[in-house]
Amino acid sequence: MQKLRDEIVAKCKALLEDGTVDRVIGWEKGLFDYDCSPATFTKENIDELVYNEYCGSNLSKYLVKESKAEGNVAVLLKPCDTYSLNELLLEHRVKKEKIFVLGIPCGGMKDEKGELLMKCNTCKGNEHKIADEVMDSDLTVPEARDRFELVEKLDGMTPEERFAFWQGELSKCIRCNACRNVCPACTCLKCVFDNHASGIDSKANADSFEEKMFHIIRAFHVAGRCTDCGECSRVCPQGIPLHLFNRKYIKEINELYGEYQAGETEDSRPPLANFTKEDAEPSVIYEKGRD
Amino acid sequence: MYKLSIDNLNELFALIGQDSKVYAPIERAGQVEFFLWSVEEKVRLDALNTVKSAKGFFFPQTEVLYKTKLEGKKIEIEAAEDAEEPTVYFGVRACDVKSFDVLDKVFLSEPVDSYYAAKRKHGTIVSMACSKPADTCFCGLFGIDATSPAGDVVTWIVGDTLYWDSKTEKGEALTVKVKELLVDADDVEVKKQQTEVKEMIAKAPLHDLSLEGFGGDALDELFNSPKWEALSSACLGCGTCTFVCPTCQCYDIRDYDSGHGVQKFRCWDSCMYSDFTMMAHGNNRTTQLQRFRQRFMHKLVYFPANNDGDFSCVGCGRCLQKCPQSLNIVKVIKALGGKKND
Ligand code: SF4
Ligand code: SF4
Ligand code: SF4
Ligand code: SF4
């Protein structure tokens, strides 16, 4: 991977030299080997850019901020990260003309224990869905497991068992908002949970009802827009499997409206934001809700 | 010094539990936190740091301070939950015990926070020495000895034996209460473990940090450092670092209309949030750079300026482990501190 990293740096240098971009968003080394951080580079410090198996964070959301800054920016995106950028473009949250997307191959990303990240177990594949250029490499993503495996297991539980499972997980939540703030689909200028005028703003879960409310609202707000990039579960300090909420909604949407992968292209019609005569009737809720 | 077999831990907790509450590190849904002990729970004394720190014992994440009830022209005031109940906190690590000193300086100085004070007064702390510090630990930087924590009773686990040494009056009282389970012991094994662990700490990755250049005198220079920009640029403005930190102490208070009165509610707040210290004229920190700077300046500059040079970090390493983007106080210390960190 060192060779690929050197080639990426050489490419970024060329982009900075010829004026295509003013900055590069990539990763820098942390205190240890396993804690790389997102960082912004210029001509002066581009040699500090790293790319290794600890660069799991998805850099696409930083483009919202970068789109408002002066000048152009190059961004390093792994295959899965490109879905998030497409979704951001679809929702007009970033300006493509200011961005140079350098697609970088991926061989699977790891956590601090050296284990494959949850998201990489169900990788969407080697293809970059949007890129101005893709770096060449023989790296290949790990073989994917079925991403609905656990959702189906939960679906198979009795309502009481399922409730107990989620109660156990969500009662760990400390409402740090890491899952929300890292999410590339969460780009509201002011989140309802931060907006005093919304009447439901809150900084802490005062009881078990509020624990669930935050999560159900969060997941509903990204339903049909979530690309399943897995960042929410990666960052949760309590190891709550938030991706299972998202995947539940993705599975339901697939079943009700036909297969849909958010972020596949930058001009798709999201099923929940698009009306067709074939759409599921609202009454499906009554049939589905019972067990 | 006394000892007891760790097979007898549940009996110890049950005995203490006869007339007080017992909190211990307990695993639920894969994570270890301090929870109220009961015999069904899975106690995890081997886990190093709980996700949330021990500060919640005395400064809980959410708390109803009081309620008022309005009937016609009569206002009735209902006091907060009873905080007078004796409580034993078992298995608190050296860094977290030290964090109580930091919190005491805030909550027990005038005007005293009576909610905090009541819980602190009725709490007995049984600390536990560390035998396997993590790569992310750097408590030594703040003069903390992980092999010899403070606390009312200090414990060490060597093999299958728990060693017990009381250090204060409260500790003595607890020792008397559980005497029937304890047997006399010498400190040979404890000393041996301490020597080994100290050697490990001396070789740990973060053992040679320096705080040179921090403290109240450095205010202007550090505040205006151009390095904050790069340090903070990846910050998401989530509150993870502040909520897992044992010394972060800021809170928000709101009055809620309960339909027939008012509920006075307090919860943890985070300087990383956009509405932190919001005032009538708006917010005095409008960028994430300013908010990020506030957190670290508070710990390394403002707090020592107001508290005889004591820092408001205890080196527990939680912010190193939990920040989604791996930003943390050690990076700040290395970037802004003296040459010794190079
Ligand atoms: S999901 Fe696939 S592309 Fe994304 S980081 Fe994991 S292995 Fe790489
Ligand atoms: S990241 Fe985890 S702990 Fe934080 S708010 Fe989200 S679910 Fe809760
Ligand atoms: S420093 Fe890290 S944990 Fe703290 S607010 Fe920023 S991103 Fe969140
Ligand atoms: S700043 Fe970080 S290392 Fe220091 S006490 Fe807080 S969480 Fe622990």
Image: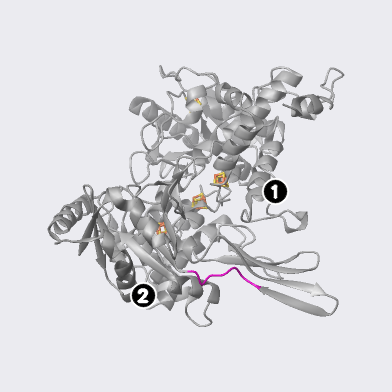
Q: Which residue is painted at 81% across and 28% down in the image?
A: A286
Q: Which residues, given as a range, are shown in magenta?
A: B79-85
Q: Camera-side residue: A249 or A93?
A: A249
According to the image, label 1 marks what residue? A189
Picture coordinates of residue B258, whole percent (x, y): 76, 64
Circle 2: element type: loop
Kind of residue at badge 2 = Gly
Q: Is residue B288 above or below residue B309?
A: above
Viewer-nearest of discs 1 and 2: 2
Q: Is residue A253 magenta?
A: no
Picture coordinates of residue A155, whole percent (x, y): 63, 25
Does residue A224 appear left or right of residue B32 in this picture? right
Does residue A244 appear left or right of residue A91 in this picture? left
Circle 1: element type: loop
According to the image, label 2 marks what residue? B309
Does residue A91 appear left or right of residue B130 in this picture? right
